[in-house]
Image: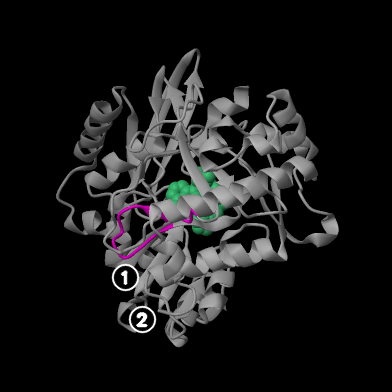
Amino acid sequence: MGNYYQEAIETMPLEELQKLQSERIVEQVKHVYENVEFYRNKMDEKGIKPEDIKGIEDIKNLPFIEKDDLRDQYPYGLVGVPLSDCVRIQSTSGTTGRRVVAFYTQEDINVWDECCARAIMAVGGTKEDVVHVCYGYGLFTGGPGLNGGSHLVGSLTLPMSSGNTERQLQFMTDLGSTILCCTPSYASYLGEAIAEAGIKDQIKLKAGIFGAEPWTEEMRHNIEESLGIKAYDIYGLTEISGPGVSFECEEQAGMHIQEDHFYAEIINPETGEVLPEGEVGELVFTCLTKKAFPLLRYRTRDLCRLTRKKCSCGRTHVRMTKPMGRSDDMMVVKGVNVWPSQIEAVLLKQGYKENYQIVVDRVGSNDTIEVQVELTPEMVEANDVPVAKREAAVVAGLKSMLGIKVDVKVVEPKTITRSEGKAKRVIDKRDLYK
Ligand code: DLL
């Protein structure tokens, strides 16, 4: 193992970890109370003084912070250090026009790079590897995060950014990329492009680090097949730093949260009550070490479950399941809660790939929902099931999963636009009528 598998920290017994977290939260609460007026006011409103927070178990007394607070405090309201101590911003576009701008000191960047380095080491990365980063660079955290991590590991880093698939394949083959970092939807597109170019035998990839959007186990399987690699999940969000807040180890059984820096809780999204280990709820993060943009008890809207069950990799850090979708991804269609991931699961189970789109609309006062999904090249070649029969099977699968009638259109391969970054799979035309 190289420098950035921090065995002492990643395999720390729980008691020691909690001691470290306690020291850090005490210092962090003092920091935000003294330096961020927003927090001071919120804590004063609740009658909490920094000295009331004596350890990590007291965190439950702190107020939550929500996405709306970030919008209200845009751009500088939550910055905890003089701007002259900040060296970087990153930002998320936000699908609803809510731009989040996060600030970093050099030390914050170092911690972020370290978390991404741990993620690369966890998939077997070393200084001998060629790390091909085709997450977007710029304001998006994907490119800069994995880039920084790869440098720390000492791997040869290809800062490809997203797009220009032909060039991606050329560098991948010419320079012998071994670890691929991009969104799962782009990985799946690269798999298609490699098959089409007939160059699979020239690809040296062994692992992929894919995240930034939800993806299913079926999609993992498809990517692993098409690229001939092991595909690992990585999670993070701009508000908390970027990729590397959690990541999978060789066991591929949930993502270890970097708990020495980010403290996780699961709450009931309706009541805010903290839920016991193992229950599904909204993920809430507290940054224990970040100084420039130190969010405490930030509600991510991501729904998942945590487990402290022993992991055979030896890491003791708590694991989170793949987010099952965001509470705000949920659509209400015909009065029923629908998550895109449920639709994807039905499609992939019936042998389709991730090339689909969901169109929701309203006719009069009735909602309509249509799923368009592409035939795979194998289905076209076999030509053994009529399209109408295929459509009926998907309709039935969706009816049993969701309990409502969904219109289904099975379309020719390559009809649906491919994504180079995060895929946009839902078009909700009802938004236009708001
Ligand atoms: O997507 C950071 C990132 C970059 C993570 C590269 C992993 C790899 P944002 O653009 O702020 O940051 O979006 C954060 O994306 O709250 C989740 O809803 C979703 N998300 C991120 N990773 C995963 C994942 C980056 N592995 C939001 N699985 C988060 C499912 C994910 N959803």
Mark 2: give few (<14), some (14-19) or many (20+) Cα within 10 Å: some
Report the residue that reaches farthest toward the top. Answer: 365
Percent from the top left, x then y, of residue 355? 38, 50
Q: Give the secondary structure at mark 2.
A: loop
> Is residue 395 depicted above or below 201 in this figure?
above
Q: Is residue 419 visible?
A: no
Q: Amino acid at mark 1?
A: Ile
Quarter of the view holding residue 68:
top right
Secondary structure beneath dot 1 equals loop
The residue singled out by tag 1 in the image is 229
**Quadrant assignment, res 337:** top left
Quarter of the image with the N terminus in it: bottom left
Q: Residue, x 32% and y 77% (percent of image)?
A: 200
In the picture, measured across the screen, residue 395 lies left or right of residue 275, that is left
Residue 204 badge: 2
**Quadrant housing residue 253:** bottom left
For label 1, the crowd category at 10 Å Cα-Cα, with few meaning under 14, some 14 to 19 and many 20 or more, is some
Magenta segment range? 247-259
Query: Residue at image x 53%, y 50%?
Result: 21
